[in-house]
Image (cartoon, rainbow, N blue to C red):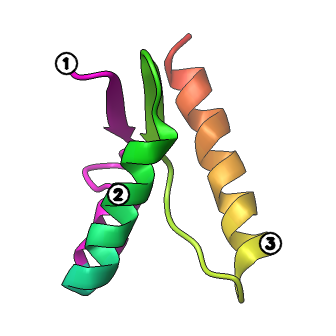
Amino acid sequence: MGPFEIREYIEGARSPFAEWFDSLDAVTAARLNKYIQRLAAGKTIIILLGRGSKRRQAADIAVAVERWMRYKQSKN
């Protein structure tokens, strides 16, 4: 394992983040990968809950909060 671990939230058999990420063009995907690399420091775990846009920010945050709650419950 490198300096950090990335985990994707899985809903059923799919990753909402992966579905969105796979739809990105190569330039945007590379920028996002570079950004994620800069976020992590030490033994950080990054859990990718989904994706979002400025237009749908409030709704996207609400969905991410719901997924986070389900993720936490599944770990107990």
Residue 12 seen in the current view:
yes
Type of amino acid under label 2: Lys
Farthest residue, direction right: 58
Q: Which residue is drawn at the image coordinates 50% and 42% (left, top)?
A: 39
Whether label 1 touches label 2, CB < 8 Å: no
Q: Badge 2, how many Cα within 10 Å: few under 14, some, many 20+?
A: few
Circle nearer the N terminus (1, 2): 1
Image quadrant in which the C terminus is located: top right
Secondary structure state at the residue bearing disc 3: helix
Residue 57 falls inside the magenta stretch: no
The span picked out in magenta is: 1-22
Q: Which mark is residue 34?
A: 2
Q: Which mark is residue 58?
A: 3
Type of amino acid under label 3: Ala
The percent coordinates of residue 24 (x first, y second) are: 29, 82
Whether label 1 touches label 3, CB < 8 Å: no
Secondary structure state at the residue bearing disc 2: helix
Q: Where is 34 relative to 72, above or below?
A: below
Depth-wise, is mark 1 or mark 3 nearer the camera? 1
Q: Which residue is drawn at the image coordinates 44% and 26% (left, top)?
A: 45
The percent coordinates of residue 27 (x first, y second) are: 26, 82
Type of amino acid under label 1: Met
Circle nearer the N terminus (3, 2): 2
Left or right of 20? Residue 42 is: right
Q: Where is 52 relative to 35, above or below?
A: below
Residue designated by label 1: 1
Q: CA distance from mark 3 to mark 2?
A: 25 Å
Q: Quadrant of residue 6?
A: top left
Q: Which residue is drawn at the image coordinates 61% and 80% (left, top)?
A: 53
